[in-house]
Amino acid sequence: MHEPHEAGGILSKYLLTLYVTGTSPRAQIAISNLERICQQELQGQYELEIIDVLEHPQRAEDEKILATPTLIKQLPPPLRRVIGDLSDKAKVLLGLEVRPQPAGSTTRPSAT
Amino acid sequence: MSPNTNKKAGSRSIKTGNKTIGRTSAETSAALTTTETGSKKMSVEKLRTGISSLDIIAKGGLPKTRTTLISGTAGSGKTVFGIHFLAAGIELGEPGVFVTFEESVSDVKKNMHSFGWDLAKWEKEGMLAFVDASPDPHIDTMEAGGFDLGALVARIENAVKKVKATRVTVDSLGAVFSQFSDQSMVRGELFRIASALKLMGVTAVLTAERTDDHGPVARFGVEEFIADNVMILRNALEDETRRRTIEILKFRGCDHQKGEYPFTIVPHGGVIVIPLSAMQLSMKSSDVRISSGNLALDEMTGGGFFRDSVTLLSGATGTGKTLTVAQFLQGGTEAGEKCLLLAFEESRDQLVRNAKGWGFDFEKMEEKGLLRVVCDYPDVQGLEDWLVTIQSIINDFRPQRVALDSLSALENVGTVKAFREFVIGLTSFIKHQEITGMFTSTTGSLMGGDSITESHISTLTDSIILLRYVEMFGDMKRGLTVLKMRGSWHDKAIREFTIDKGGMQMGRPFRNVTGILSGSPVHVSPADIERVWRQFDSDVGDRRQVDKPSRS
C-alpha cells in the first residue's frame, strides 16, 4: 500500500543486488556493465549491493541463486531476475522493466 | 574426519587443467581441475552404502570419493535410490547433502516420508542439508549475457561443509538443462560440479534421465563427463507386468557383479536389490534330519528331511499336497519348532477347517506361538515384492520350517524369468537361514505329467516328492514317491496312500502296475514282475527288504 517514495522525488528507488563469483573477469564485466546502465538509466536513484557467493554462500542459498552473475531487482516490485554478465543492455532494461528514455525525461517502472 | 584425509590424498594426484572459460577464483578453479587416478593405490576404495543388497552386487559398495551416475527412465526409482543412499549413510552416521533440480524440497520430504525417512528431522539434527535448485515458477528470469553456475557450486560446497557430508546426491542432471537455454554451458558447468564433488572428497550419486530402457545411457550426453561409474535402473514392461532391474554398467577401476538384478521399492524399506548369484554361493549344508510329520514318509526319505533342505511337492489337484504340508507343520510344532505357512490358494478358515479334518489343530498351534499362517491372494503384489515380504516375515517370526502352498499360484504373477528368480531367491534365503522348506506345485494334468513350475525349479530343490493319481480298475488311488533326495538314500517305490481322519496313511507299493509317472498305468501280472526281478537277482534281496510296508 505505502510505497516508499522519497520526499520530493518522483522516482521510486531501485534496490538491486548482484551476485557474483569472486573477482572473476565475468564478475568484473557484470559489475562495470551494471554500474554504467544504472548511471545512464536510473539517474543515481538506486542502491546496489554486490555479493560474492564464495564468501556468502548462505545468501545464495536463501535466494536460490544458481547462476552467476545474477542481478535481482527487489524494488520496485515486481521482483525480477537477470542472469548473465549484463552485456546485453536492452535485455537488462527489459528485465528490470526500465524503458530506455532520452536524458531528462522521467524514468518510471512500467505500470503493473 | 574422512573428507579431510580424502582431500589430502586426492590433491596429490590432481593435475590442473585450464579448459573452461569464466574461471573465477582459486576455489572454483580448483573445482575445474581434472583428477587422475592415483597410480600408487592399486585398487579403488569402496564406500559401504548401507543398502545391504546393493553392496552385494557392487561387491562392497560404491567407489569412494567418486561420482556414480544413476540413469533410468521416468519412474525407474532414481530419486528413491538417491535418497536411500543418503538415508542409509545417515543411519551409519555419515551426513549427506541432497541437491534437487527437479522436485521442491518440501515435495521431496513429503514423498520420502512413506519410506520411513524423516528428512526434516535429519535436517534439524544437522545430518542432512538440502540445496534447493528446483525451478521456482514465481521467479521470472531473463538471460542477458554469459554466465556460469558458480553460485550453485558454492552452495553445494557450503552445504557439504555445513554438515560435514560424505555423501551427496544430485537429482537430476537432466532437469538443469531445462532451466537454461545454453546447453553447452550447462554441460560444461555440470562437469565442473562433478569435479568439484570429487575434490570435496564426497561420494556422490548423480541421477540422469534416459528416454528408453535400452537406449543411450542418458539424455544430453551427461554420462560422457561423469562416467567413472554408471548404474542403470530399468522399469521394463514385460507381459503386462513391470519389472524393475538394476545393472552396474561400469565401475572404473573396480569390480562389480555383472548383469541385471531385479529390485523392488517397498515402503519402509526403500530400494531392495535381489542379488541372485551372491545368495547361492553362501549356502551351508547340514546333515541333521528332521521329521516330515509322517513316520512312513520319514522312513521313505531315509530318516526325514535335511535341516536346511527344500522339498518340492508335486501333484495334481486333490492328491494331498496341502495334507502333506499340514503334516510337515504338525511334525514341526510337535518338535517345538516354529513353523510358517504361506498359503496362496486357500483362505485361512478353509485351511483351518481342512486341517481339523485330518486331525491337526492349526488354531491351537498358533495360540502356542508355534505356527503362523499367512494367507493372501498372489496377485496383490509382484514377485519381487513377495520375495521381500516373505523375507521380512521370516526375519520377524524366525521359523524353523517354512511351507509355501502353492508355487503354481505365484507362477502367473510375473514372467517366467521373474518366477525363476523368485524361487532362486526364496530357496537360497531360507537355506541360508537353516530353515527347512516345503513348496508345493500343482501339475496341470490329473495323471502324471509335469508342470512348468517343476521344470523350472526342480534343479533348485533338494528333494522332490511326487503325488500322483493312479487309476486301478475304475478306482482312483493315490500314489507317492520320493523322486529325488540329494545326499541321501531314499525309497524308490511308488506307494499307495489313503487319507483319513488321522491324515496320510501310507500303504504298500504299487507292485503290479507300471507307467504311473508317465500317466498311463499298465497292469502287469505278478509272474512278469517275478521274471524281471530275477534278472537282477543280486538286487532282489535288497529290494524286498526295502519294499516291505513300513507300517504294519
Image: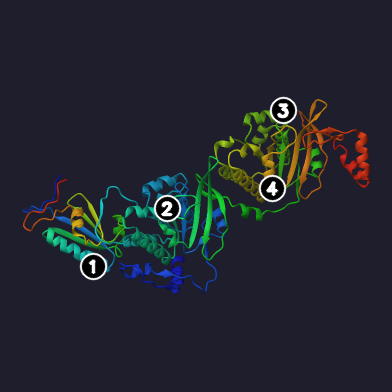
Q: Secondary structure at mark 3?
A: helix
**Amino acid at dot 4:** Leu
Residue on which the image places disc 3: B357
In 3D space, how far apart are the residues under numbered discs 2 and 3 (Cα atoms)?
A: 55 Å
How far across and how far down the image is residue B103, in percent? 38, 49
Residue at left 77%, top 42%?
B483
Q: Are marks 3 and 1 on the same chain?
A: no
Closer to the camera, B282 or B524? B524
Q: CA distance from mark 2 to mark 1?
A: 40 Å
Disc 4 to disc 1: CB gap under 8 Å: no
| Residue B400 visible in the displayed image | no
Give the secondary structure at mark 4: loop
Residue type for callout 2: Trp
The residue that label 4 is drawn on is B460
In this rendering, the label closer to the viewer, 2 or 3: 3
Q: Residues within 10 Å of mark 2 (few under 14, many from 20)?
A: some
Dot 1 falls on which chain? Answer: A
Residue B151 vertical position relative to residue B318 in the rendered view, above or below = below
